[in-house]
Amino acid sequence: MDEKVGKFWDHYVTKKASRLFKEEEIVFADIAKRLKLFYHLLGGEKAKELHITDKRSIKTSRTLLEKFSGTGKTFFLAWQDEKGIYLPSSLSYFPLRAYNEMHYYWLIAMLANVNIKTKKIENENINAANGLIEKYAGFSEFYAYAHPFLITNYPELSTIESSSEGSSADNYPNPLWIYPSLSTSGKLLTTEDEEDVERQNDEPRKSETLQMKKKSEQIDDKKETDGLLLFLPESILSFMEQVRVDRQENDSFDEDALYNAEDLDEITLGQKDANLSARIKMDLDISANSIEEYPLGKGHFIDEWDYKYEVYLKNYVCIKPIVSLHTEPIELPKRLEKMMRCIQSELDLMELDRIKRDNLPYGDEINIDTWIDYKGHQNRSNHPQRFFETFERKTRDMSTLILADVSLSTEAGITQEIRVIDMIQDALMVFSESLHRLQDRFAIYTFSSIKNTKVNFHLIKNFKESYNDNVRGRIHAIKPGYYTRMGAGIRESAKILEKQQSANKLLLILSDGKPNDVDRYDGRYGIEDTKKAIEEVKQKGITPFCITIDIDAKEYLPYLFGRNSYAVIRDAKKLPKVLPEIYMNLTK
Amino acid sequence: MSKMYYVPQGNEIELFKAAAGMNLPVLIKGPTGCGKTRFIEAMGEELGRDVYTVVCHDDLSAADLVGRHLIDENGTYWQDGPLTKAVRNGGICYLDEIIEARKDTTVVLHSLADYRRVLPIDRTGEVIAAHPDFMLVVSYNPGYQNILKGMKPSTKQRFISLSFDYPSPEIEKQILLKESGVEDSIAQKLVAIAGEIRRLSDSDIQEAVSTRLLIYAGKLIAHGFDPYQACIHSIVESLSDEEDVLEVLEKLISLHFTKSINA
């Protein structure tokens, strides 16, 4: 009973204290895509991603009611760092949906205009705001409404205007402003968090999986004395402010720590390494080369692009070409034969797509032009009298290199029995079969990487080899590898494709996710390197095209490949069927 | 006759004139609606040469360019194609969107586009030496290319290339003022909108807003249309069919030309 009353009271007081308009709330997830477009429109950096931010606690003067209810201490603020921009998960400061929505657009516009590195937040924000008001009539109208409204509703805000000096943290945060990144070092802890972010009102709401950024702060805990407990007994039931979150090792994580992390506003990151046993386990995860893999030479080095310094890291990545030996030659599996028959009918249609050849001594139809020409010719006996025309299959001057990403993530299951890698294998088989029947030249390679020192580049079929049971055997023997250093794979493939004599060269990349590796090749670094590699490919006159089963790929693929050069396949099981179709559409 | 209005973006007029003086063929690249065709027409007027425009398509045969025999009551007779006409009489032969034409079609241009400057017509056995005022100009839009379509390097390398882009904001504003007769402040805003939309391009929308569309918007506004409505119909709806994109573009327009937020 007590508990119930308490809950009720809490609910009542929080609601009373809250000065938000929950009924008119706008949720970020609903308009995320539009906001991203808008961010691009206003000139925001395209490699940055949009995230939901966690609340930040800020020392402020609170109203009596807020002190009672425990609200008003933490805030969802908009901020950015060099990797992305972070916005509140929902906004409801204003009593009208239209204004709340506008508030998001306003924040985006501010984010696109505010200088991220500045120290004087006040000046920067005021300047940016003035710029927007001057430039856009719509924003000026919004600001003319929002600014006075916020000041009347949150009288604390007016202090900002008066005190231009002094630390901003002591002021009440302005919801219209952009705040600097939390940690100066730019190190942030990302937690995959299914919990409710919105606890400001203690209103339990269901929310989707969120990428939350927790405030992180680095402390030096290396000197911590082992075995000696240094805390007051009465604090034993409270969460410790310092949680050991293991960042060195991705495989295991302390669930308790994660659980606590959700409730702590601030996570302190320790710099202590994971213990030795964990490290050993890591190394053991990567099995020694299996016997049947035969390296072709010691490997060679290629460059990589570092976007931060805008330079190529010369000979930075080591490519190790490998071929699997002693694989068992196999025929086309029975389960694929039916699909192949289905595709065959489409292949036949391809052959219908033919070009007209005229000036033939015999053929399917009379070419009226030639006949008239003959009639008008002065010396008819001298005329070649080739009156016929016929439709012939286009000669396709094509070389296609298929580069399949076989990172560890392809081990993931689609259903209980089928893994992504199985689908990739099937797709490659059906695809090779189709190209073989179309008599197009093609090669197949797969790649996976562990850091820049080892990018395994498996040869499945090169351009010279004819398609046969051995190739199928090698496709069958493809195993998931490690990580996806996509830029390296693309550059190496381009080198091979470049040597081909065909007029048309197609690089078909089969992928299941973003470029990533265990070192810094992750996030923006990987994206930018891959983008650079794609640019190089295009310069060489090769057409890149990416086929992915990553549903989130729409976020980054347009940036990497351009709008018309990628396809997202939602259902990985359809991959074998869709791959030849995409190819046929591309080369029609 | 009033002179055709064209504002140069850079040194293209000097280049074009020099190329015309030296009988060099010209290739013009650029996105849609950035003024390629207008430029050629203006140059034709400036140089006092006729412009023969051929819009290329994938069924365009060499006969469509060179000419063919036709029949009338007296029997057959030869009809010159636009290319042959320009070669005989002098003038600018302008092949628009040359990429769309089949590669084997464009090979007939080869002997015209190098030092020989002759057009052999095998149907009539004629070899026509080009008129001193004959000039070959081709254009294409590098934006929408099919993987298998592209210019043969051997064709591409016979031309002086001019790369066009959308005009700079100041020039674009001038063009808008002149072409649509819209007010200065509105032209300024239209140019700002275009500048923002052009940042999207490639990854989010197929092709950015062209100067041509801005002029349309300007004309509607000058005619008395509500600026917001004019922009929605001339700019936003023409650029995309995707709902999200439309929504955001609409938002952008409403920021520049306010539609009351309460409405």
Image (spheres, rainbow, N blue to C red):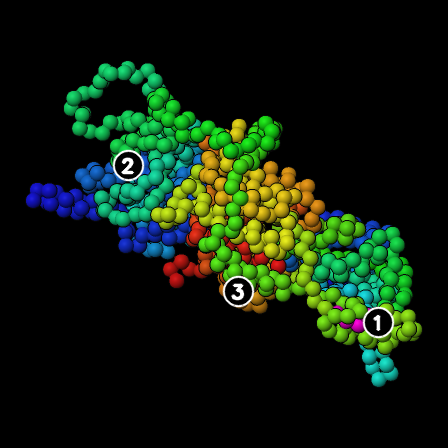
Is A205 situated above or below B136? above
Which residue corresponds to the image point at 30% horizontal and 17% vertical from the top-left? A224
Residue kind at label 2, given as amino acid type: Glu
Does the magenta-highlighted stretch encompass residue A2?
A: no
Is the N terminus of chain A in the top left, top right, bottom left or bottom right quadrant?
top left
> Circles 2 and 3: CB distance less than 8 Å?
no
Dot 3 falls on a residue whose secondary structure is: helix
Rate crowding at label 3 as few (under 14), some (14 to 19) or many (20 or more) other CA atoms within 10 Å. some
Q: Nearer the viewer, residue A429 or A498?
A: A429
Measured in 3D between alpha carbons, the distance from the residue under mark 2 to the one under mark 3, in whole angstroms, is: 48 Å
Residue kind at label 1, given as amino acid type: Gln
**Does the image show residue A241?**
yes
Tell me residue A49's x, y (percent): 45, 42
Residue that mark 1 sits on = A385
Q: Nearer the viewer, residue A238 or A79?
A: A238
Measured in 3D between alpha carbons, the distance from the residue under mark 2 to the one under mark 1, in whole angstroms, is: 86 Å
Is B135 situated above or below A183? below
Is A347 situated above or below A49? below
Query: Mark 3 or mark 1: which is in front?
Result: 1
Residue that mark 3 sits on = B233
Dot 2 falls on a residue whose secondary structure is: helix
- The residue segment tinted magenta is A385-389
> Circles 2 and 1: CB distance less than 8 Å?
no
Q: Chain of mark 1?
A: A
Query: Mark 2 or mark 1: which is in front?
Result: 1
